[in-house]
Amino acid sequence: MRKTTPASRWVVRLAAATIIIIVLCAAANAGGRLVSGVLGTTASATSATGRPLDPAAFSPGACVAFPPTKGDRHRTVFLDAGHGGIDPGSVGTTESGQTIYEADETLPVELDTMALLRRAGFRVVVSRTGDTSVVRLDSGDVSGGLLTVQGVHDDVAARDVCANRAHADVLVGIYYDAGDPDNAGSVTGYDAARPFAAENLRLATLVQADVLHAMNARGWDIPNEGVQLDDSLGSSITSQSVSYGHLLLLGPADPGWFDTPSQMPGALIEPLFITDPFEGSIAASSAGQHVIAGGLASAIEQYFSRTG
């Protein structure tokens, strides 16, 4: 088993995205970041069959609803592929030395999960179908071609707005972790400060267990970092985010700073550290993406089978 360090190591998280963006966007703007051709083709194909929920509020290709392709369970699942557009997320590396970006690797997992769930009878709404932001960025969200702190806030908040407008029954965020090269493992977060906290925990427990099982059934030996409260995940970069103490994607309202929280049970998984070359190689592979998607779809189906 690869070495891991205590839970306090997680310093590169959703709430800390701006710190990473400043570095990564500069690199991307200077040298260009490669998005796989398969990913681009999939995004184009899925965009053609989906229905944007509010084109005026969201970026082109963002907040798109897809009907089931077989049967109809009359349930809606919202899937969020973390980051996107001028926010590439965390940067990692594969065992071959290839540089990878979180936003590029979360998207195919989201789209693969969507395809599985549609075939199982679910309506699926995704935060994005391509390499874009979710919110339609305005002048306050961008400075010098980079997201501002407000831009990071607005783009994450837009994912909750999309889930709410979709009347989703459940929300699942798909992100990757980052840290020192010897940090490894899967973690799933949930929020306990919501009226549906028990359902959040049940969903997070299923997501963590099913995705980890799917990966380790392949012999990958991914460490289990468990199910954790979202107040233990993320780093805060403003006094407001320190005071808030939750991940925006999962957390409650905070009048004057965050007015559009999600209205359904949710969980956020970081199944791998993309800064660990072994785990980064899995995250960047179509096989790894399919395996993670299969675990997510299984967990969501189990969640609803027990809900009725």
Image: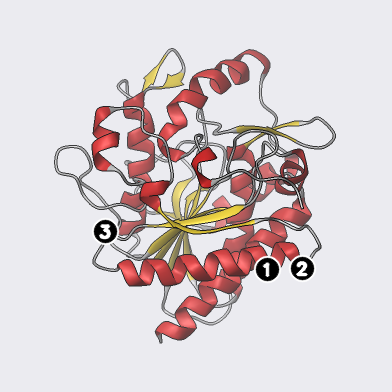
Q: Nearer the viewer, residue 1 or 35?
A: 1
Q: Decide: marks 2, 1 in contact (CB < 8 A)?
A: yes
Q: Residues within 10 Å of mark 3 (few under 14, many from 20)?
A: some
Q: Residues within 10 Å of mark 2 (few under 14, many from 20)?
A: few
Residue 222, percent from left and from top: 70, 56
Q: Callout 2: helix, strand or loop? A: loop
Q: Is residue 283 above or below residue 150?
A: below
Q: Earlier in the sequence, mark 2 or mark 3?
A: 3
Q: Residue furthest right?
A: 96
Q: Which mark is residue 58?
A: none
How many numbered circles does the render carry?
Answer: 3
Say which residue label 2 marks.
Answer: 217
x 43%, y 45%: residue: 233
User: What amino acid is found at the position of numbered circle 3 in the picture?
Assistant: Ala
Q: Earlier in the sequence, mark 1 or mark 3?
A: 3
x 64%, y 61%: residue: 293
Q: Residue furthest left?
A: 255
Q: Residues within 10 Å of mark 1 (few under 14, many from 20)?
A: some
Q: Callout 3: helix, strand or loop? A: loop
Q: CA distance from mark 2 to mark 1?
A: 6 Å
Say which residue label 1 marks.
Answer: 213
Say which residue label 3 marks.
Answer: 193
Q: Callout 1: helix, strand or loop? A: helix
| Quadrant of the drawing holding the C terminus | bottom left
| 240 horizontally vs 113: left or right | left
Residue 136, percent from left and from top: 37, 34
